[in-house]
Amino acid sequence: MHSDMAEWVAAIAEASSVFVALFLPYYNQHVENKRKLRNVKMLIHRMGKRSMNGDEDAMEHLQTILTTAYLKNMNSKTEDVINDGQQILDIMNMSEGKPNAEQKKQIRELLKEIDEI
């Protein structure tokens, strides 16, 4: 009876280790993708606000961030963030770095949308 219990415990431990070995990489990738998405959102948010406030270098940084994020696109959420960031950059380019009140409102709405992704 005692050896039957030991065999069951060993079998459960072995099955658990297989489960962890199979799914741990997927979980780690998920956590890494969330971290990368958070960083992209934060950078787009920061550069979007800076460029809206007249920082010309921020527009270049925003373009670089968008290009890099596009090349390393992890998932559809990242794609949505990149699209919103590109719209911000387009508004800034159309206004030649000096957005009017309506354009600033559009940028703020896009930044809010990025926050909600």
Image (cartoon, rainbow, N blue to C red):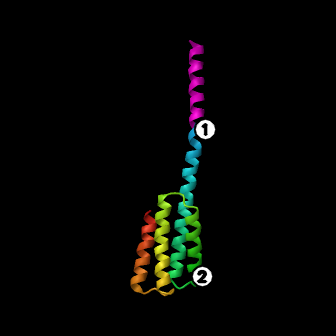
Against 4, is 13 above or below?
below
Q: Secondary structure at mark 1?
A: helix
Q: Quadrant of the N terminus?
A: top right
- Residue identified by numbered label 2: 57
Type of amino acid at the residue the image marks with label 2: Asp
Residue extent of the magenta highlight: 1-19
CA gap, disc 2 to disc 1?
46 Å
| Residue 49: percent from left, percent from top | 51, 78
The quarter holding residue 59 reads bottom right
Q: Residues within 10 Å of mark 2 (few under 14, many from 20)?
A: few
11 versus 21 height, above or below:
above
User: Is residue 81 one of those drawn in magenta?
Assistant: no
Q: Quadrant of the C terminus?
A: bottom left
Whichever of labels 2 and 1 marks the residue nearer the N terminus, that label is 1
Indicate left or right for 109 with 82 as reference. left
Q: Quadrant of residue 102?
A: bottom left
Q: Secondary structure at mark 2?
A: helix
In this rendering, would 83 be left or right of 8? left
| Nearer-the-camera pick, 63 or 110 | 63
